[in-house]
Amino acid sequence: MLKKLFISLLASFALMTAAFAAVDLNTANQAQLESLTGIGPAKAKDIIDYRTKNGPFKSTEDIMKVPGIKEGTYAKIKGEISVGGKAAAPAAPAKADKVVKASAADKAAKASAPAKK
């Protein structure tokens, strides 16, 4: 019984991993492209036609050169696509605008706290 449960969990994990794999724009077929968010049969065909005519994509951003695919579509699919196994770079974390300084009350509380041994 436990063995069957383990095998089921392992199979589920393998399927989930495959589902989250990035679609390579340079090797994807029609069905793989259609699995992308917001990409239907017509756009998938346009991507394949563009790739056939212009050669392989050099970066994921190049998909915006395909007629009908703009920044909005790219924003939706950039986490789902790759070029030559390289996925789009994640967005850089936001930097803090300013450093918060300790207030006088915080400094006084720290000064009056008993010393740690």
Image (cartoon, helix red, strand yellow):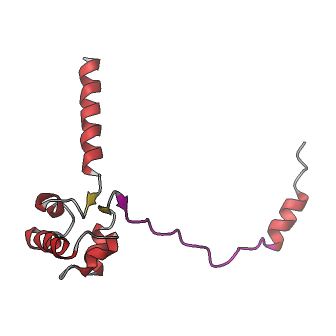
Q: Is residue 93 magenta?
A: yes
Q: Position of residue 28 (x, y in %)?
A: 19, 59
Q: Residue at x 23, y 22 (%)?
A: 4
Q: Residue at x 43, y 65 (%)?
A: 89
Q: Position of residue 5 (x, y in %)?
A: 26, 25
Secondary structure mostly seen in the magenta stretch: loop
Question: From which residue to which does the magenta span run?
Answer: 86-103
Quadrant where the C terminus is found in the figure:
top right
Q: Residue furthest left?
A: 41
Query: Is 18 rendered above or below residue 64?
Result: above
Front-most of residues 7 and 106: 7
Q: How many marks?
A: 0
Q: Residue at x 53, y 68 (%)?
A: 93
Q: Is residue 14 left or right of residue 109?
A: left
On the image, which quarter does residue 57 sit in?
Answer: bottom left
Q: Residue at x 38, y 65 (%)?
A: 88
Front-most of residues 115 and 77: 77
Q: Position of residue 43 (x, y in %)?
A: 13, 73
Q: Position of residue 92 (x, y in %)?
A: 50, 69
On the image, which quarter does residue 75 sit in?
Answer: bottom left
Front-most of residues 37 and 49: 49
Front-most of residues 109 and 74: 74
Quadrant where the N terminus is found in the figure:
top left
Q: Is residue 99 magenta?
A: yes
